[in-house]
Amino acid sequence: MSYFDFSNFETSFNNYIKYILGKQFEHASKNDQLNAVSYAVGKYLIDISYDTQKRYQENDVKRLHYLSLEFLIGRLLNNNLLNLGIYKRCKRFLETKGIDLDLLVEEERDPALGNGGLGRLAACFLDSLACLNMPGFGYGINYDYGLFKQVIVNGYQKEKPDYWPNRRSPWLIRRTEERYMVPIYGRVEGSVDRDGEYNPTWTNWSLLIGRPHDILVAGFEGRTVNYLRLFTAEASEDFDIDIFNDGDYFKAVGRKIKSETISKILYPSDSKEVGKELRLVQEYFLVACSLKDIIRKYEMDHHTFDHFHNKVAIQLNDTHPALAVAELMRILVDEKGIQWETAWEITKKTLGYTNHTLLPEALETWPVTILERVVPRHMQLIYEINQRFLEYLTVRDPDITIESIAKMSIIQEGPVKQVRMANLAIIGSHSINGVARVHSDLVKTQLVPEFYRLWPERFNNKTNGVSPRRWIAACNPGLADFITEAIGRRWVGDLSRIWELETFENDPGFLDRLGEIKLANKEALATLIRKKLFLNVDPQSIFDIHAKRIHEYKRQLLNVIHIIHLYLSIKEDGKDIGHPRTFIFSGKAAPGYHFAKLIIKLIHSVANVINKDPDIHDMIKVAFLPDYRVTLAERIIPAADVSEQISTAGMEASGTGNMKFAMNGALTIGTLDGANIEIAEQVGGENIYIFGLTVDEVEAFRPNYEPKTFYDEDPDLKRVLKAIYSNLFCSDEPGIFKPVFSQLMGNGEHYLHLADFRSYVATQLKIGNDYKDRAKWLSMSLKNIARTGMFSSDRAIQEYADGIWGIRSFRG
Ligand SMILES: *Cc1c(COP(=O)(O)O)cnc(C)c1O
């Protein structure tokens, strides 16, 4: 398949062990073997990357730079072997050495340089850019500590540091020849230059040093290798003295600050702004290093900035890198001497902004005082950008209201003046996109309607996608081989072909085999559950899976309430609940999010009671798999019958877990939220379980919502809530779940759990019945696999490339 040859793989492998490790093969540990294979694969990547870069440079192509504080990449060996098309050859070679490749890939660490969906999206996008042979590169931070490891002690989440041995990863190339000096803190002194122009100097700053490290990203079939560039903050003893403009050596040394802390740790919240100065410093560090790198490259081949935006596109993954607006202006105006108006046009045409959330608590703002201290020149530029923008507003529409101006201003007035990063990103970008159709509509109508009325042409939608290489081919080889046998291999590089599977719908043996593949995946997960939790679950039961960050809006609680309801219907009413079910949860709560941590405890407590109760006759099992991360998702998703996507309508921007589950043949139970709406359109209403209030209904409903009415009028619900309030699930820690009861019964309960309960129960009942009809279920499952081709991140990237970035596929 691949166009290069495999012959030197063996030599590379042997040489690594012999000459680099200085060991005899018999003494090489598993980890040595893993490193040797990775090294041999890495050599191919480097060769192809040289070719790729040369091609890009010779043809002076436009490049895309994806700036993100998170890249949740997962393990790399398996995917690299698969994308290069050498998995089978590598496996055969290792067999001659007595090594099982399938086991060896399990030795690799899973770098957790992201929290969840947003970071995983960035990783899928890099995969797709390389697979589409497009010049697109990731820019992020090389954290020492990624997202914490979750351990469960007596049902409670505890966080353990997860040190990523990035300094020793075989995939990480330290660029010793490059480093960037980033000024920070200090003050701005205004002065007037010879032409009478205001000419500020940023003085007395301290210095950060950013060292690039690259992870190479291989496209499918190995034509293109791009990179993800991660910056480590280093302290340096021997920096280049030329950069000190006042020439005072001793003062200069004094300004070098201990910068290593900056890339030490990833902030562990995926939906709440933290507001810590170190986080702002990280954001600035990423932006400043990235822009220095981008501009250094640009200037190697170009001498003016007039056409910068024709060669460079920069996408901001959420507002975290929004300081890029000010930093690019600073470089163009202060360093390159470009007129403000020209610089502003270039900046806007270069930048695009992706919004990821409507949750008010997640919208990023920073106190002006902090920005003034950390990046005084940028704060000054932000004021200037804002002043010109507000002037433009009043000139454009002299009747504009004070309220509209106040909403659009970058500065939020109040006791503590704040900078609104979303407004900064919107004003400084030519494109603003949401991540699913309904979300993009809500950005226009609810989040920033004033901006939408001002610049409707800047707003657009790019529905998320996931990589079919990682999320089908690599994680579900049984299914992948089965698909390939039926329709050939093209689907891996072009998931729009996957619909061809439907033509086999009436082949009698076909659905049966699909069922066997699912069962095998469920057996593998059952084994994992037994090993990790000492719990036996039946692979013949319905595997109903809720795996994602723990958050009230994702409504793990609604799921738990239903499980308790099923439990009590068996226990107290002697009801038959249909087919046996295994409810599997997995997910981390932010360390400071106490209520989410209580939900984790509740899941464990409920599991403890139900799993042990002989009256239930194993009709229900509940399992919580700790430490959800990419590697675990790769095991869980292929084994799902039912995918829980039950967020309160209007609160999940898109979701990508929903896509991964559906394309692996799980049926979705979900609200009409985020990309669920588009999944329902694709698979057809008869192949998905939609329930609950819609976005419009939620909006109309919320002002008068009184949970107590539902409690009083629904005896099943009342019974469940009383059970939570009582000590049924917490006899040795009485009263601990009372806050759950109060939260659910609180007036205006924001997530509308009780309002959606009845509809959720009815839909779950239908699932229980439908599952019994195996042929029907498998046919629905097949339609989910065959009709979710549009949720490939290749489709998403093609839309970004055509609609926002102006980059093209370039195979050479
Ligand atoms: C896909 C993925 C997510 C996102 O899941 P959602 O259900 O969209 O919230 C989070 N974490 C990991 C490890 C993932 O693979």
Image (tube, rainbow, N blue to C red):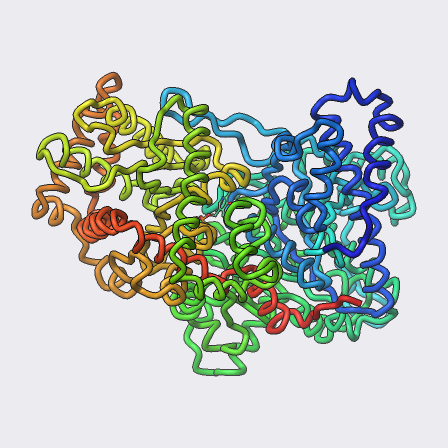
The percent coordinates of residue 213 (x first, y second) are 76, 43
The percent coordinates of residue 25 (x first, y second) are 81, 22
Q: Which of 810/361 is in front?
A: 810
Residue in view at x 43 percent, y 64 percent: 502
Residue in view at x 37 percent, y 20 percent: 154
The correct choice, above or below, for 308 with respect to 504 in the image is below
Q: Which of 30/362 is in front?
A: 30
The correct choice, above or below, for 746 with respect to 221 in the image is above
Residue 552 shown left or right of residue 267 in the figure: left
> Tag count in the figure?
0
Residue 518 shows up from this direction: yes
The correct choice, above or below, for 723 with respect to 3 in the image is above
The percent coordinates of residue 660 (x first, y second) are 47, 51
**Quadrant in the picture for residue 307:** bottom right
Q: Which of 353/600 is in front?
A: 600
In the rendered image, the quadrant that contains the N terminus is bottom right
Residue 593 shown left or right of residue 48 in the figure: left
Q: Which of 624/412 is in front?
A: 624
Residue in view at x 61 percent, y 62 percent: 490
